Amino acid sequence: MMTDPVASRRAQIASFIAMDVMREAKDLGRAGREIVHLEVGEPGVASPRVVREAAKRALDAGRIAYTEALGMPALREGIAGHYKARYGLDVPASRIVVTTGSSGGFILAFLALMDHGGRIGIPSPGYPAYRNILQALGIECVEIPTGPETGFVLNAASIRAAHAETPLSAVLIMSPANPTGVLTPASEVKAIAETCRELGLWLVSDEIYHGLTYAGEEATALRYSDDAIIVNSFSKYFCMTGWRIGWLIVPERLIRTMECLAQNLAISVPYLSQVAATAAFEAYEELEVIKASYARNRAVLMEALPAIGLKPLPMDGAFYAYCDIGRFSNDSMAFSKKALHDAGIAITPGLDFDRTEGNRFVRLSYAGSEADIVEGVKRLKGWLG
């Protein structure tokens, strides 16, 4: 008797619920419903003008070819210049790896740092793709709870305790955080870097929301550790989600390892995206105007959500409001489904980010237009009474 082959066990990972919500919301939109999209963390504006113009020139020039696996030298130099301008840090371009978005960067980093069966501590709540990618790679994901007692910040003491319970290979931090928007203080980033050095752990710092802070300043782990692996992207601050381009900063001793992995996994990041990203560093003025629109949207939500009965965590950075819905529901999946179908508002259930406490939370993105935010608030208020 013949049987059909099945997918591997490593492929049996959970869905990215935010993307499922987006798909369902777009299906409803195609069917004629007017949906307010607050579910996905994506800027609601076009990529900067200079980015689009650079891409057009490259297309008109003709040949779109492979590049070096580590990235085009001009782009790597541009990223190095960004760290000098933004942080006052001298980062050799030789330590920079251009990646297919931060997602490609995480895959490279996880493969380079840990063997099958390795263990990495990550914050909970946190970005769901971390644990899903790690599961697919056969790396054990240790979710370290954060909550009101730590200000929803993964701290050095929690990392030390998790490592003492069962030794870790690495730790991943994110600031500003997704989904909470919480900013890790510079003093805590420094303490985490020192703890990882003391315990012999790799430190991976997800900094893709750097540049998008409204209460305090972000701190790069690179300031406190040359061994830290920095993950960043052109998607969020630079408004280039669909270009799928990001970068890593890694210790010199990992560069050849990263190069070999990149050569075999992707050959290179798309040429056109690299040309466009190189121009992005000319767009700071335009990008700050866009950031100011997020700040206005944030102000609208900070005033409106508590009045509706939704309690957001501190919205320090990124472009998210992570709200306690305990007054209305203890089932964030059902709450989000009803919000979509009853009120035409697409939001992401907290269960996507936290499998233990996420049923009490939902995440709203305020990266869209001010009109969308105002309309979303109006619909939430009408729906929740």
Image (cartoon, rainbow, N blue to C red):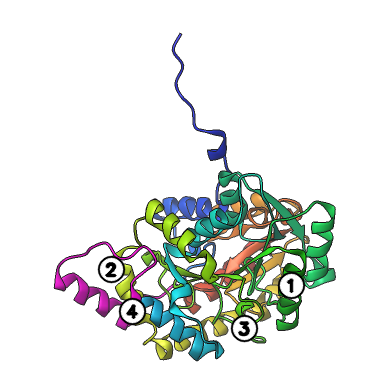
- Residue bearing the label numbered 3: 299
Identified at 48% across, 50% down, the residue is 24
* Eye-nearest disc, 4 or 3: 4
Q: Amino acid at mark 3?
A: Ala
Q: Percent x, y for residue 55? A: 26, 74
* Quadrant holding the C terminus: bottom right
**Whole-Å distance between the Cαs marked 2 and 4?**
13 Å
Q: Residues within 10 Å of mark 4 (few under 14, many from 20)?
A: some
Please give the label number shown on residue 192.
1
Q: Are marks 3 and 2 in contact (CB under 8 Å)?
A: no
Of helix, strand and loop, which one carries label 4?
helix
The region drawn magenta spans 44-73
- Residue bearing the label numbered 4: 74
Of helix, strand and loop, which one carries label 1?
helix
Q: Percent x, y for residue 334? A: 65, 49
Q: Percent x, y for residue 205? A: 61, 69
- The answer to which of marks 2 and 4 sits earlier in the sequence is 4
- Residue bearing the label numbered 2: 272
**Whole-Å distance between the Cαs marked 3 and 2?**
36 Å
Residue 154 visible, this angle: no
- The answer to which of marks 1 and 2 sits earlier in the sequence is 1
Q: Amino acid at mark 4?
A: Ala
Q: Are marks 1 and 2 in contact (CB under 8 Å)?
A: no
* Eye-nearest disc, 1 or 2: 1
Q: Are marks 4 and 1 in contact (CB under 8 Å)?
A: no
Identified at 49% across, 62% down, the residue is 105
Of helix, strand and loop, which one carries label 3?
helix
* Eye-nearest disc, 3 or 1: 1
Which residue occupies the foreground of this view, 355 or 344? Answer: 355
Q: Percent x, y for residue 29? A: 42, 56
**Whole-Å distance between the Cαs marked 3 and 1?**
31 Å
